[in-house]
Amino acid sequence: MTVRACGQLSRCAAAIGHSDRMNHDADALAQLDQLSTALRVLASGPLPLDWLTGRLRAEFRDARVTRESVIAMAMNATVLVGRPDGRICRLLDVLDGQTLTHRVEAATTDRTDLWTNVSLQPLLLCASLDPIPLVTGGELTAAEFGHPALLGPAGWLPDVPAGTVLALTVEGGRVRIEALPNGVGATAAQEQRVRAILGRHIREEAWWSDVGEPNREAELNRALGHALIEDPELFRRPVSPLVELLHDVLSEHSRQHVFDDTAAWAAGDVVSFSVAGMPESLHAELNRRAAKYGMSFDRFIVATLGHCAWRTPFAEDLGPWESWEVPTAQSSAPTILRAVKNPSDPEEPPDQRHSDTTDPAEGAEGAEGR
């Protein structure tokens, strides 16, 4: 199996991992080859980790294919799912018997392309790597140029108007599609349960993400796979489309960072940099303080560096801004401090206090006169 078109590489890269940005180079294509081979081998069902490692090493004749590298591939590739018992399977196998729904935004009359969104993201990514057979015949593929659309043979789409809900059910590795003109029929309690379980897994994926703008498609794919491993009955009955069911969960990142993004744009010209060799304990402490003050990690670092910079002697230099020379302190006459009497000292006679304040020279002249 090979990637169907170069225009799909970006979507395939999204399926590889939620934090890795793949470049179109030899290493990226090698990763895709290994992933494609793993998906082909796993088409027969879940396989033990050690068996799959040996098969891939023999297939590629590459000693770099180790148990650790296969674990990393399973953890990064969102179209693969690692089971708690150590076996690895395809996301499409986890979706077996599950129904995903989508509300069409345009009439499907005489159409062979179904434009979708995150509601059918798992099927869209699986179809990007390998066509999915349809129960009615033909195959379900992804758009050639990376559009968010699924393609099928003529007549595969029910003839429905805009706003109708379609249900796509995976049955033994094949997809069945039908229209739900009366809606999904799920109760509020059923949808709330699905929202709670899937939302928890999505938040866990977002917490582990180490990039400023996480890959929402990859996070949703992984969260869906883990949620179905936890509860295989989660999508046995149709529920509202994921984009509607998880609207609040999927938009949390945008709401949390809208003020940070606004502040970044308002700052004018900015630069980006990276810090290498930061101690892990320091990184953890900075993260803790950023969370305590309700700030993102980047914004807290910028604020801290700005505070340190303007607390130096440079802060006293108010102009011109082209020069950062610290002004020289002006010399001044020394200040003469008056002695402070200690309360424990004995009281001095008035004459003695007067003589202490009299100039010695004047005292000598007065004595000669007397």
Image: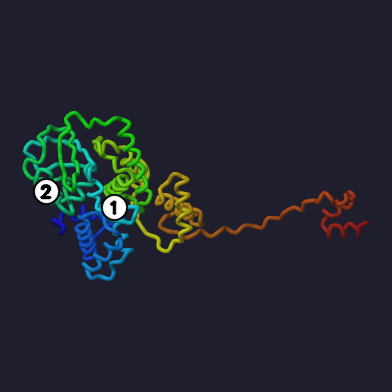
The circle on residue 139 is 2
Q: How far apart are labels 1 and 2 at the CA level?
A: 23 Å
Please report the residue visible at 48 percent of the width from the left and 57 percent of the height from the top.
282
Please report the residue visible at 19 percent of the width from the left and 56 percent of the height from the top.
9
Q: Which residue is mark 1?
A: 81
Would you say 1 lies left or right of 228 here? left
Looking at the rendered structure, the kind of residue marked 1 is: Val
Circle 1: element type: strand
- Observer-nearest of 221 and 50: 50
- Observer-nearest of 93 and 205: 93
The answer to the question of whether label 1 and label 2 lie on touching residues, with beta carbons closer than 8 A, is: no
- Observer-nearest of 296 and 153: 153
Q: Residue 249 in the image: x percent, y percent?
A: 33, 40
Eyeballing the image, is 185 above or below 346?
above
Q: State which quarter of the image contains the C terminus.
A: bottom right
Q: State which quarter of the image contains the N terminus.
A: bottom left
**Mark 1 crowd level (few <14, some 14–19, many ≥20, 10 Å Cα):** many
In the picture, residue 232 is in which quadrant? top left
Looking at the rendered structure, the kind of residue marked 2 is: Glu
In the picture, residue 254 is in which quadrant? top left
Circle 2: element type: strand
The residue furthest right is 370
Quick one: label 1 or label 2, which is nearer the N terminus?
A: 1
Q: Is residue 142 visible in this depiction of the protein? A: no
Q: Residue 190 in the image: x percent, y percent?
A: 31, 33
